[in-house]
Image: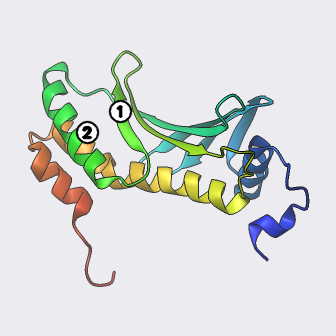
Amino acid sequence: MALSEQFIDDDIHPIDIVENLAADHAWEFDRIGDDQIAMAVEGQWRTYSITLAWSGYDETLRLVCTFEMEPPGEKAGELYELLNLVNEQCWTGAFSWWNREKLMVFRYGLVLAGGQAATPEQIATLITSSVLNAERFYPAFQLVSWSGSTPAEALQVAIAEAYGRA
């Protein structure tokens, strides 16, 4: 049975869908308000903080996935160069660096203009792809910050295909 078949009401609030998905996956979550939820999703490299917020004004479900980093200040130029290279590889969403908070951020907005309803599959894909992107590029961010790798070298770690079987 598809996730969307669990819901009969087409007008279910997108944050209600997120809450159900979080409960189904046993993710820690906090319903901050009617239009916002925060959760923690465990990845291979980090635990990612994910916040989803619904804006009825512009009919957009906004996702922000963050993880802490504290790169040395002198690495800022290389980090920004890597961010540009990484964002060229991301078809949905984009990374940015919030220096004051020391957070790497992946952001995406699902526009549901015209009264469209989000499906559980869409929201699950949104959450999953944000974590997969964070997992994919986390090693590159670390390499640029701490190993002396150039942005181009670090990016190769993220885009290299694994061959064989473990």
- Image x and y of residue 20, in percent: 79, 51
Q: Is residue 45 above or below residue 68?
A: below
Q: Give the quarter of the image for residue 150.
A: top left
Residue positioned 35% across, 55% down in the render? 136
Residue 61 in the figure: left or right of residue 100:
right
- Residue sitting nearer the eye, 153 or 53: 53
Query: Residue shown at 10%/44% (left/top)?
Result: 149
Q: Which amino acid does label 1 sit on?
A: Ser
Quadrant of the snapshot with the N terminus: bottom right
Q: Which residue lies furthest to the bottom in this view?
A: 164
- Circle 2: element type: helix
Please state if 11 lies on the left or on the right of 133 as rendered. Answer: right
Query: Mark 1 = which residue?
Result: 96
Left or right? Give the position of 46 relative to 58: left
Residue 142 in view: no
The residue depicted at 58 percent of the width and 59 percent of the height is: 125
Label 2 and label 1: CA atoms lie apart by: 7 Å
In screen coordinates, is 116 left or right of 69? right
Image spot of residue 116 (x, y percent):
72, 50
Q: Mark 2 points at which residue?
A: 83
Q: Position of residue 67 (x, y in %)?
A: 44, 36
**Is label 2 in contact with label 1 (beta carbons under 8 Å)?**
yes
Q: Name the N-terminal-most of marks 2 and 1.
A: 2
Q: Which residue is at 56% across, 53% downward? A: 126
Q: Classify 121 as above or below 70.
A: below
Quarter that holds the C terminus: bottom left
